[in-house]
Image: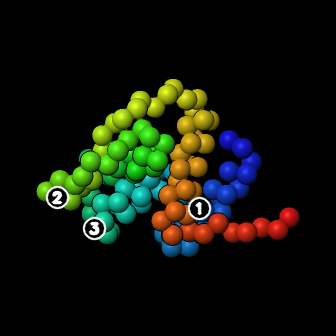
């Protein structure tokens, strides 16, 4: 992962830790994105529902890359996606890069986070 992305992602995590507490990791961020996309706010979720929320987050994050398409919500308002294009095999490092970049894009594009402007 390139140094710039790593620094940008660390700044996002620090910003979100102010709201959600210290120690939030990538899985925690995926869970938060899934809960946000579900749109019901904080509630108690079963283990299965937590896994589904993480899946919703991944689909949401990869939708702009053309891998998934949102197809609608079910009777319980859970979002559903269609796989459009298989995700190519990536190294662990490349997977991490893609997800972190997509998370940054998600928080910025949805107006939840504004990247700091640094003058170097």
Camera-near label (2 vs 1) is 2
At which x and y percent is residue 36? 37, 63
**Residue 40 badge:** 3
At which x and y percent is residue 99? 53, 45
Give neighbour class at mark 2: few <14, some 14-19, many 20+ (Cα, 10 Å).
Answer: few
Camera-near label (3 vs 1) is 3
Q: CA distance from mark 2 to mark 1?
A: 31 Å
Q: In the structure shown, which secondary structural element does the residue marked by tag 3 occupy?
A: loop
Residue 97 higher or lower than 75, as above or below? above
Q: CA distance from mark 2 to mark 3?
A: 10 Å
Task: Left or right? Give the position of 26 relative to 63.
Answer: right
Residue 51 visible in the shown view: no
Residue 37 visible in the shown view: yes
Give neighbour class at mark 3: few <14, some 14-19, many 20+ (Cα, 10 Å).
Answer: few
Task: Left or right? Give the position of 90 relative to 67.
Answer: right
**Residue 13 badge:** 1
Task: Left or right? Give the position of 15 relative to 52.
Answer: right
**Residue 76 badge:** 2
Picture residue at 42% right of the left edge, 58% below the top: 33
């Amino acid at each position: 992962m390139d140094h710039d992305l790593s620094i940008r992602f660390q700044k996002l995590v620090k910003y979100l830790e102010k709201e959600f507490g210290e120690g939030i990791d990538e899985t925690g961020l995926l869970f938060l994105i899934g809960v946000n996309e579900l749109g019901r706010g904080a509630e108690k979720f079963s283990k299965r529902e937590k896994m589904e929320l993480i899946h919703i987050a991944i689909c949401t994050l990869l939708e702009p890359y053309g891998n998934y398409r949102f197809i609608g919500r079910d009777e319980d308002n859970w979002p559903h996606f269609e796989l459009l294009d298989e995700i190519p095999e990536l190294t662990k490092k490349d997977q991490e890069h893609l997800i972190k970049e997509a998370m940054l894009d998600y928080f910025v594009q949805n107006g939840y986070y504004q990247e700091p402007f640094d003058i170097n």
